[in-house]
Structures are given as structure tokens and as C-alpha cells.
Amino acid sequence: MELPVVKRVAIIGIGLIGSSLARAAREYGAAGSVALYDGSADVRARAREIGLGDVYDDVSDCVRDADIVILATPVGVMGALVQTFASAMKADAILTDVGSVKKAVVDAALESVPDHIHFIPGHPIAGTEKSGPDAGFASLFRDRWCILTPATELADDAGQAALKRLSDFWTVIGSQVQVMDVERHDRVLAITSHLPHLIAFNIVGTAHDLESVDQGDVIKFSAGGFRDFTRIAASDPIMWRDVFLNNKDAVLEMLGRFNEDLAALQRAIRWGEGEQLRSFFERTRGIRQSIIDAGQDTDADNFGRDTKK
Amino acid sequence: MELPVVKRVAIIGIGLIGSSLARAAREYGAAGSVALYDGSADVRARAREIGLGDVYDDVSDCVRDADIVILATPVGVMGALVQTFASAMKADAILTDVGSVKKAVVDAALESVPDHIHFIPGHPIAGTEKSGPDAGFASLFRDRWCILTPATELADDAGQAALKRLSDFWTVIGSQVQVMDVERHDRVLAITSHLPHLIAFNIVGTAHDLESVDQGDVIKFSAGGFRDFTRIAASDPIMWRDVFLNNKDAVLEMLGRFNEDLAALQRAIRWGEGEQLRSFFERTRGIRQSIIDAGQDTDADNFGRDTKK
Ligand SMILES: NC(=O)c1ccc[n+]([C@@H]2O[C@H](COP(=O)([O-])OP(=O)(O)OC[C@H]3O[C@@H](n4cnc5c(N)ncnc54)[C@H](OP(=O)(O)O)[C@@H]3O)[C@@H](O)[C@H]2O)c1
Ligand SMILES: NC(=O)c1ccc[n+]([C@@H]2O[C@H](COP(=O)([O-])OP(=O)(O)OC[C@H]3O[C@@H](n4cnc5c(N)ncnc54)[C@H](OP(=O)(O)O)[C@@H]3O)[C@@H](O)[C@H]2O)c1
């Protein structure tokens, strides 16, 4: 592949994902230059300070010369944001995003996207519990998947070439690309990401509110399992509010199934049905091994975070 | 503190915890020698092979000369096991355990414990998702808490000296000791360990059973959050069956609260109540920071497992 993949990429929203993309695009040579915009003046100032790219105070100026424009804000604002700059984008440029929900973003943005632009929504399955421009790093997307959900109109040659260009961009920064439709994306992510976050936020909230147990005890004895959930529950509240508001149907469906299964476990505990508990706990082990074999997690004890000193 | 703390420790059950104790007792000089017994002949053979200590084929022979006897089997068998060897223990020796549940163990074992023995139940808040004699390592208990739940009869001088001896043993292998009563232990652990495990087993089970989502997709896109839960859900099924059967009341109480809170979140999602979601997600962040400040977790992104390569 010839580098850089594109001359210039513009990134709107300079948080964890946006700043990681800016770093990765330059470090791995995916883009010749990086244009940046963020709604917050403080974030723009910080991005200038740490030299993430050419930072603009106006979003239309930011996107004007870009071959690829990547939205990296919370999903709730993406639709309105596209309206403000789409007409400033140059012909044959690609508009994409990194939002954790796809159907709602597509529906909100689609009517503002001019015909001369290729709209190819995306979602890198990579992240951390941190936020903001200082939290990002170039290798975030390495060995991770990036899902692209192109509209069917890409069926023409120019559309296919654009899809190839965007795939190359993600490949160069270390990801594997998978194309799928928006509905499938939203269903798969509801179980692999949105429901786990909801459950984690919830159990940390339950522990927080317990009057019958000392908060100090919850902190001290968190190594029994609870601490794993607090990492996920430390993720950005605005980002996650927007995810749940915008993937309501799939999340509620998965939550319904989760609740049914939990009711069955609750009943087995109440009635002392040991064999049912054991066989339930037995069959979940295979999934972890498959995830390790697929290179999506470490096999080190406790994720390697505190063992074998 | 003069080392070794005791001349000889006996450990019954040579799995993750038992084999870690054997390694730690020798490496840090907590015991002059280590006697070992396990119900499984294969495990005994393996313990001999890797040189964990003096391995016995008879449990009474194993405990005979020990100053401290530590039960490290699943909690469900502890009561019956104590009956088989308690009379072989020497006078003034300490009988303790590492079980994740305390009240049920105490109730099941107490009547078999002879008067000349100090019975001081315990629980190290340390572990991994692995099992068996090869999974253990000496530093497992370092910087972790160990809870001791002595019976009130320890109020005499000999009892207090025994408690001091057992505390010293745990301190030498790197733990901080906290004394509390059995009811408090079982309530605190229900929220910090038992409920998190139940939830993790459950969500992995829900994902496993989904016909509407490809299993391959669950594996590939697990880095969105799901993979964190699969680690905990890979823990030993027998151990966890016994925990839920033996801490039923506290687990069902915590589960009831968890379900109430989850119903409120579900309702907020259904009715699009963004502000309620955001404020709920906001208030859970402080707990993680406290856990990091207390040295009970790492602050590295994603537990440091795959970032900043
Ligand atoms: N975090 C993850 O693990 C992860 C993984 C995959 C995908 N995603 C997706 O990536 C996107 C960004 O997430 P993130 O974790 O990078 O969030 P983040 O660190 O909070 O960054 C978001 C940035 O967007 C800015 N912003 C908000 N509204 C804006 C607007 N109207 N115009 C311009 N900038 C605006 C924010 O500024 P303020 O600070 O002033 O609000 C902030 O600097 C989200 O859509 C999320 O769903 C996240
Ligand atoms: N894992 C953790 O994270 C953790 C943390 C703190 C406390 N604990 C507690 O520590 C204890 C042991 O857990 P673990 O993780 O070390 O489990 P493990 O790795 O499965 O080891 C348990 C060992 O006990 C043996 N055993 C079972 N029944 C026995 C009997 N009647 N007599 C003698 N040996 C017997 C087992 O042999 P077989 O293989 O033949 O069954 C196995 O070798 C449990 O009570 C658990 O609640 C665990």
C-alpha cells in the first residue's frame, strides 16, 4: 500500500478516540496531515499545546481540504454537527464517524450529506475508560476490529473506491476492517459492549448506595471481583448516555434476555439447585478461551495487572 | 518478627489458593515446613512433581505435626472434612480456612472442632480466574487484605496468642489482616465478590445463548467491554456453586437491590430520560478512584493489558 493513504484527514472531536486517531494517522503514515476541531476552546488549546495537528477554531475551515472527515464526538450531537460543515467538504471526500451506535447516527446525518460526498459510518472496537485529548495514544487501534457500515449507494465505482480508501486508512493504523449493515452492528454491540457497560454502571451504583455495608469495606475488598466493574463504570457519562438513548431497542432486547437468565439463576440459588448452578457456570468457560485465541484478550492471570511480582 | 512464624503449616486442598500458600509460606519464611494433602491423587502427584512440600496420602498424617492447618478446598466440603482429621491435630494448634463464605463454614465445622484447637476462620481477598496446583504463585497475597473471623471464645490469653500467630503468618506473606464478624464478612463479600461473579456468569451465559447474534461476532468484538466479564466467568464452577449455595441470604439481598436499580435504568432508557442516565453514570466514578488510591487496582488504561505498545 502506498503511504500516506490520503493527503489530509480532518477529525472533529479531540477526545480519547479523536486524539488517538490524530496520533495514529501521523505515526503510521495513514495521512499526510491532520486537521482538528473540537467544540471546546480548552480542548483546542490543549491539542495545540501537545501538537496533535493543525487545530482550527472553525469547523468548516477544518474540513475544507480533507479527503476523509472523521466525526469523533458523542453520538448525540453528530446529526446537528454534520449540518454545520457538510457543504464545506470537497467533492469525492469521505465522511465517516467512530460512534458506538450506527443506525441513529445514519438516520440523523443522512439528509444533511450532499451527493458529492461518500458517507461511510464506522466504529472502531477499541477504547479505554479514559477521556480527553491526553488519554489518546497511537497504538489504540492495533489488533482491533473496525466495523464499517456503508450505505448501499456505494455500489458504484467511485463509492467502492472510497470504501477501499477508508479501509486502507484503518488497516494502516493497525485494524482489521469488517463491513456489515447498521442493524447487525447495533445488535452485536448491544451485547458485546452496551449491555456490559450498563451492568457495570448499575452494580457500581448499587454498591455506592448500600447503607448496610461500609463504603470503606467496598474499596478495601474490591479485589474479590468488584474492581473489574469499576473500570468500565469509569467511562464517560455523556458518551454512554448518548449510546443508550440512541440504541434503545437493541439494548432493551438484550437486557430483557439478561433479566430472564438472571431470574433463573436467582431461583436456582433460592432453591439450592447446585447442579443447575454448576452446569450453568461450566458452559461459559469456552467463550473466554475463544476470545484469547482470537487475540482479543490476554491470558495472563487477572489481566496481568498485579500478579507474579 | 522472628521467622519462621510457625514450624510447620499443613494445607488441605492444593489448588490455586492452597498451592499459592505453600509457595508463599516457604518463599517468605512464614513456615519452616509445609505439609500438603488433596482429595485427588492426580493433584497430589502433581504437587510432588513440582515440589510444593511434603505431600501426604492421608489427611490425618498431614495435619499431625502442624501448628497451623489451613483448609483450601471448596467451602461445601469443609464441614465434613474437618470431622475426618480434627482429632489428629495437636493441642494449641490453629485450624483456619480460606473459604469465600464464612458463616456456613463456621456452622458446619464448629461442632467437630475439639476444645484444644483454636478455630479461626479466614478469607484472603486475592485470587485469579485460574485453578489447580500449577496456577498458584507466591506473591498472590501481597498487598491484599486477609479477613479473619475468630469465634468469641478466643477472648482468653491462649486464644489471643493464636490470633496473633495467624495474623503474623498472613503479614509475613504480604497481606494486611482485618478482623471482623462472620455476618459482616458475608454481607461485604456478597457485594464485592459474589454478586459481581453472578452477574458476569450471567451475561456470558446470555451472550452464549443468543441465536440472533453470531457467536463469531461476540468473540471478535468483545474488546468493547464484554471480554472483561469473561475473565471472571472463567472461574471454577464448583467453587462458585458452593459460594452461592452457602451465602444464599446475603447474595439474594444484594441481587434484589441490583435488580431494583437495573429496573430504574431500564425505565430511563425506555423513556429517553437522558439527564437521569447521565447523573447516574457520573456518580460511580469516585469509587474507582478510591480503589486505585487504596492500591487495590492499577490506573493503567484497560488494566494495562493491551495499550501503548
Ligand atoms: N471511549 C471509547 O472507548 C470509545 C470506543 C469506540 C467508539 N467511541 C465513540 O467515539 C466517540 C468519542 O468518544 P471519546 O471516548 O473519544 O469521547 P471524549 O474523550 O469525551 O471526546 C469527545 C470530544 O468531543 C467534543 N465534542 C462534544 N460535542 C462536540 C461538538 N458539538 N462539536 C465538536 N466537538 C464536540 C468533546 O468536547 P467537550 O469536552 O467540550 O464535551 C470532547 O472533546 C463517541 O461517539 C463514542 O461513542 C468511544
Ligand atoms: N479462586 C479464588 O479466587 C479464591 C479467592 C479467595 C478464596 N478462595 C477460596 O479458596 C478455596 C479454594 O479455591 P481454589 O481457587 O484454590 O480452588 P481449586 O484451585 O479448585 O482447588 C481446590 C482443591 O481442593 C481439592 N479438594 C476438593 N474437595 C476436597 C476434599 N474433600 N478433600 C481434599 N481436597 C479436596 C480439589 O481437588 P479436585 O480437583 O479433585 O476437586 C482441588 O485440588 C475455596 O474455598 C474458595 O472459596 C478462592
Image (spheres, coloured by chain):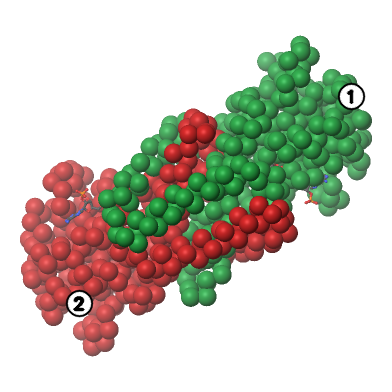
Chain colours: A red, B green
| Ligand 2 picture quarter | top right
Left-right relation of B208 to A29: right
Chain letter belonging to callout 2:
A
Residue named by callout 1:
B90
The amino acid sitting under disc 1 is Lys
**Percent of width and height locating residue A178:** 38, 74
Q: Quadrant of residue A96?
A: bottom left
Q: Disc 2 and disc 1: Cα gap in Å?
A: 81 Å
Q: Residue at x 63, y 26 (%)?
A: B180
SS under mark 2: strand
SS under mark 1: loop
Whether callout 2 and callout 1 share a subunit is answered: no
Chain letter belonging to callout 1:
B
Q: Quadrant of residue A152?
A: bottom left
Q: Residue at x 84, y 36 (%)?
A: B82
**Percent of width and height locating residue A117:** 15, 76
Q: Residue at x 35, y 59 (%)?
A: B269
